[in-house]
Structures are given as structure tokens and as C-alpha cells.
Amino acid sequence: MKIEKNPKRLAIYFFFDKEGIVDRYVPYFLKDLKKNVSDLLIVSNGAPTKEGEQTLKEYGELFVRDNTGFDVWAYKEALEHYGWEALEQYDEVILLNSTIMGPVFPLKETFDRMDARDVDFWGMTMYFRQDRDSSGCCCYGYIPDHIQSHFIACRKSLVKSREFHEYWENMPMIHSYWESVGKHEMVFTKYFEDLGFKSALSVDMEDLRGFSSYPLMMCPTKLITERRCPIFKRRMFFHEPKDFMSQTAGEQTRQLFDFLETETDYDTDFIWESILSRYNHADIVKDLNLNFVLSEKYSDVRGCESALRDNKTALILYLQYEELFEQSFSYASSMPEQADVYIITDTPEKKAKAEKVFKGLSCNRLELKVMQEGGDVAALLVGMKDVIMQYSIACFVQDMESRASSVILGYEKRCFGSVLAGKDFVRNVILAFHRNPRLGFLAPPPPNHGPYFTNIGNEWRNYYPKVKELMQELGINVPVSEDRPPVCPLETVFWFRPEALKPLFSRQWKAKEFQIEAEYEENILACAVERLYPFAVQQSGFYPAVLMSDETAQTELENLSFYVREYNTILMNHGIENYHQYMCETLDRTVADGLSVQEIKSEMQRALGSEEYLKRELEAFKKDREVIENMSLAGILKFWLRNQRNRMKAAREKK
């Protein structure tokens, strides 16, 4: 059926937040939606906060239910709330949810375009067919083409049908996200199309069928710019990086964010507000490519002058090695003359020498202090506590005994060279903070050369329990996980907004807490605090990011490419070749079992004796298709071997 002028529409909008907080992107969306519907029912799984409740009620009726059944049962109970007789009075009933953000364009464009289409139901975007059912519970055994359930408009011709009534009345309880997808979203379109009902999309996507199975996630900017798609997924900004990296070059999220910020009037602060307190910052940093690679040789001098007028700036230097004072002076000279400079050292004698070396430094104010206890972290959290909050932007660096070896010299250059790499570079850092109000923390990536190679992949070391303990003590409740690395400096060398580190500066630290523990030749608290910085930043409503100069980034890119090639060459020489994540999974299983791929092949050859037997064995695996699909040969061999061992063990136990 087509929609005539002045249609009567009902929108059922599903909302969920585990804390009940209604972020600003929700009323922004509802305000536009309400212009296009007669009635709006907002179904909330769990009660929103009082403020959130008030906000939601401004746009429609609020229906609060227990947090059971996910979105599917929220729709089911909302339909029951109205009853079929009342629902059949509407020309269109729209089921949509808060997993989408926008609109980038007025929703009226979409409704006007679709009103003329002779269909029974329609949606905005499509997920294309996949032969494998990732949910494990789709009745078709594969993923059919389907309209995505974040927005489905059902015309009266469908709503009043017996089939539609029975579909919802017989909907089983939903116990998981995958059941929600597999028992409703994947099924809805094909089920009703097979019954003869007609569907359509508002965003033309058919030509993207071979481009991506999930265009809204993998190429959202293309849909917005070329097809005027009015929505995008909130999940874009915290999605599993491995999934993105298997289907894109990793550019999709940053590309979308930059487009929204520069080419539309959509407030991107809605995005930051929605994700910073809820998702692990490692995923946010990776998905948004939050790497600030700044020039050492070019800068916007006038822009920086303006930024400095609005942002009082400080440099804090913790100096221990007298022989490096001249070098530290050279790095400190990168700061603009409007900045205040604080020098903290551990003896009066060193302070006196530092006064002589730094007396010629061009700065707004120079102050030297002595702190005989605590080291670098104490110098910042204790030594600067009384004055730090008067600054908008600050840089903290400590010197290191760089002349001890070429390895440590490289470490020093990586750290200092990524925070104080010359006047132009520092101007660019200050401008980055000025132009990105949610940016709270910039740290160089940890060195990974020589003995520091395992910094990549072992960022937590043994400090995760202590970080968790400190987070609880300080009331920092943002997500943290041992399988996600903290985006932090592994030396106290970084730029930051003092406001972003307020949770740390609010505690009454004692310098002696940070003394080196002879047993460990380090201070566990200091090492934990280094890893705590980004979580404090996130708690304060800001994001951490990685900082490098363009020259440092050149070296880093070549180093990382070299490392990846070395690993890939070895793995492929042993028959492990596939997408990154599958190679990692195969390698992990191989190492865990303590067998090389060649050993597996040899053992399998001895056990089977013939290729014909091997083929029969692999045929038997078809029932385990979900397990072995996308495995390399090595993975399949290992899978067979594990099954063979289990059979032998079961046979022995039976005897």
C-alpha cells in the first residue's frame, strides 16, 4: 500500500542504558522524529534517571518495563500495550531503537520518499546474505538478506494481518543479543516476504551487495554522502577493531567522524558524551584512529598565539641527572615564551645547578623546587598539586640516563622526541588541545625496540590488579579490561589537561608512597598510576590519544611494518596463512598444544595413512562447520588431532 497525505503514524522507540542516562543524542533524534509521526511511544528497558525520564516524556508517552527480552520483547510488549485494534488505526507503525544516531538529514526526506512506494514494510538499511549463521539460532541456517531492525516501518496492510499478529504473539523469550538477532532481525524480512508481503529500502544499497555485507557499519560515509542516509550506528565508535580490520583498512570510523564534524551541523559532542563513560578507551582510540602525528617543521603561529591567550600553559620538568641539564634545557626551549616552567629535582645542589643552566630560558615564569622523596610521579601529583589546576594545558617530562647505551638513547629520543620536538611541534600540540575540546591526554607510544619489544602486548605487566584497586578507591568506574591495553606512557612523559586528571590530583598523595621498593627495584604504585592516567581522563569526560612527531612516526611505521613482516614470514612458512585474526587464533592453538604444524602433519599422516581417509575425516567435520570455517590447513589439522585424541581418551576410559 501507498501512504496518502497526512498519514497517521505511530513510532515505537526502544531505549536502553544500564545506568538509565539519556544522552543528548536521544532527544535530538526524537525531536526530528516527532515532526513526522502522530504518536510516539518510548519503551525503556529499566527505569531512566529522573532527569532522563523528564527528557523522554517531553517527546511522547514513556513505557517502562523490566530489562528482559532485549529490544524484541520491548517491541512485543509495546504492541500489546496498544492492542491490535488500536494499532490497525495507524497507516504506519515504526519500530526503531537508540542504537542509531542522527539524523544527519531531516527524516521528512525519507518519509516523503517512501510514502509513494507501494510496499507493506520498509526500512533504511540492509544487511546482505551470508552463508554462515553467526548467531547460531537463525531458523534458516544462514543469514538471509534482511532489513536491519534499528528502523522498520510497518504499513497497515502488514499490521492488520493475521501473520503479523501471530509473529509477535508467538515470539519466544529472548535471552541474549545473538538470540535477538537470530530470532528476529535476521528472520523478519524473509519471513514476511515469503508470505507475499512487499518490502523496500529508503537507502538504495543493491549495488553494494558485493562491496560489504554490512554497509552501514563498513562504509557509512558513502551511504550518507552518496545516498543521503540520515542515520549512522552508535556502535561505530567502540566496535570490535578486529571486525573492522577484517573488512576495511580501519579508516571508516574516523572518516565518518570527520565528515560529521566538518560537513554537517550534527554536534559530534553527542558522540563523545555517549561513548566516553561506557566503553573501553582502547577500542575508542583504535576505531577513531586517535593518533596525533604533528609536524616538527611547520605550524600555525598566529593560531597558536590565539590558543595561548585562551589556554594558560605549563611545562613541568623532573630532573635527576646533572650531566643532562643542558640537554633538558634544549628540550624546554621548545615551549612558547608565554608558558610557565617548573623544574623539580631531588637535592638542593641539583637545584642550584639547574638555576644556572635554566636562567636564560625564555618563559613567562620559572620556578624550581626540591622534592627529596617520591620520584617523577610524586613530583607531578604531590609537587604540583597546589598550582596545577590554574593551567588549561600542561606537559610533564622527566629526564633519563640516555648516555648509558644506544638502546636507552633511542628510548629517550622516542619519549622526548614525541612531546618536545621543537617549537613548531609544541605549537601544534597546543593547537590540537585548543581545537579538540574533548582531548584530555597525549602520550607517545611505548618504545618497542631492543628489550622494549614486548611493551607491545604486555602493556599491563603485573599492574592490572593495582590499577583496579586504585580505580575503586578514586571512584573511577569507566570500563577496564586486562585484554585491552591502557593508552598511556610507560614513562612519565606526556601532555595533558589538568582538568582531565582531576580524579588523581584530588587524592591526598604522600611523596613517600612512591619511593622505590628495593625488592622490586621499582615502585608498584608509580607504575600503576602511569597506567591509570587514561582512565582518569575518561572518567572526567575526555579522551586519551597517541602523540608523535612526523619524523618519529616515519621510524615507527617502518619498525612496525618490519615486525609484522617478520612474523608473517615465519607463520606462512609453517602453513599458517589467512586473515590476521585467524592467523592469530591458529598460532595460539599451535603454541598452546606445544606442537609445530609440521609435527601435526606428520602425526596425522602416520595415523591416517592415506589421502582418501583424510577426505572422509574432513567430510565428517561438516557438522562442525561453524568451528572449522575460515581455518587454515594447519588449524583444520589441529582440530582433527584434538578430536582424535579425545576419541582415544574416551576409548581408554570405556575400557
Image: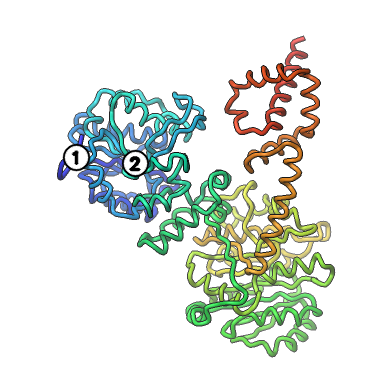
**Labels 2, 1: front one:** 1
Q: Are marks 2 and 1 in contact (CB under 8 Å)?
A: no
Q: Is residue 425 above or below residue 565?
A: below
Q: How many marks?
A: 2
User: Viewed as shown, does residue 378 lie left or right of 52?
Assistant: right
Q: Quadrant of residue 592?
A: top right
Q: Nearer the viewer, residue 594 or 511?
A: 594
Q: Secondary structure beneath disc 1?
A: loop
Q: Residue furthest left?
A: 5
- Please tell me which residue lies in front, 523 or 273: 273
- N-terminal of the pair, mark 2 or mark 1, is 1
Residue at mark 2 to residue at mark 1: CA–CA distance = 18 Å
Residue 272 at x, y percent in the picture: 46, 58
Q: Give the residue displayed 32% in from the left and 32% down from the top.
A: 77
Relative to 280, is 518 on the left or the right?
right
Q: Position of residue 363 (x, y in %)?
A: 61, 86
List x then y, in percent, for residue 338. Answer: 56, 84
Picture disc at residue 151: 2
- The C terminus: image quadrant: top right
Vertical order, 489 against 176 (above or below) = below
Residue type (three-letter) at the residue carrying disc 1: Ile
Instruction: Specify few, some or many for label 1: CA neighbours under 10 Å numbering under 14, 14-19, or 20 or more.
Output: some
Residue 3 marker: 1
Q: Is residue 642 left or right of residue 201?
A: right
Q: Give me the residue at 69% from left, 27% from top.
A: 639
